[in-house]
Image (cartoon, coloured by chain):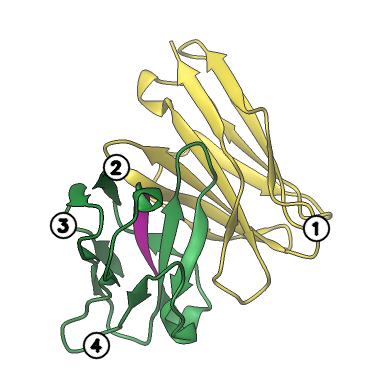
Chain colours: A yellow, B green
Amino acid sequence: KAGVTQTPRYLIKTRGQQVTLSCSPISGHRSVSWYQQTPGQGLQFLFEYFSETQRNKGNFPGRFSGRQFSNSRSEMNVSTLELGDSALYLCASSLAGAAEAFFGQGTRLTVV
Amino acid sequence: AQRVTQPEKLLSVFKGAPVELKCNYSYSGSPELFWYVQYSRQRLQLLLRHISRESIKGFTADLNKGETSFHLKKPFAQEEDSAMYYCALSPNFGNEKLTFGTGTRLTIIP
């Protein structure tokens, strides 16, 4: 079965722009989580969606938002980009009520 | 709130030597603990979880509730073990989101 798919794989944006990242979970998985991965901070939790509802939210500013569609696909949006937003953004999906997460390959965002 | 600490950012070990990657956590309830691994140019993937008590690729990890630790061990390191390792915790018997440590980059010296 297909794994978690994230698009695009690479993005270059300028400061002040906004960006939308997409994640398609494994078929049957209803929970989608987003993480920011940087060399200095490791993996930091952004938010989790389950059945189109945000279930958990990490400690990120309001510029970071997301949503989940009825087919469980999820999007993440970052507005007013800052240089510090440059990172690898990872999406993970899991079955409802199970913590084992399956990760996508990530979207590498570079803000210049 | 829960917290996961991996005290070593970098760890270098000679091939054939024992490996121990440290992980400590703080959580007052019943957590489930995991180790995830990220090999070069591959996606992050589950290595093992404490509840299954398995040995994967020669690695084992024992949950020590008294010391709140979940160290990852392997008796004889292999070159293919070089990777980034993350310890993670899920509260409430594993039914909630994962909290990750900052990771340890393991390098096996040939």
Can you give x and y, in whole percent of width and height, for residue B56 in the image? 46, 71
Q: Are marks 4 and 2 on the same chain?
A: no
Amino acid carrying mark 2 in the image: Gln
Q: Which residue is mark 4?
A: B65
**Would you say residue A93 is visible in this rendering?**
yes
- Lower sequence index among marks 1 and 2: 1
Q: Which residue is mark 1?
A: A1
Q: Which residue is mark 2?
A: A41
Mark 4 residue element: loop
Amino acid carrying mark 3 in the image: Pro
Q: Chain of mark 3?
A: B
Can you give x and y, in whole percent of width and height, for residue A26 in the image? 74, 57
Q: Which residue is mark 3?
A: B7
Q: Residue at x 76, y 48 (%)?
A: A73
Tag shown at residue B86: none
Tell me the quarter of the image containing the N terminus of chain B: bottom left
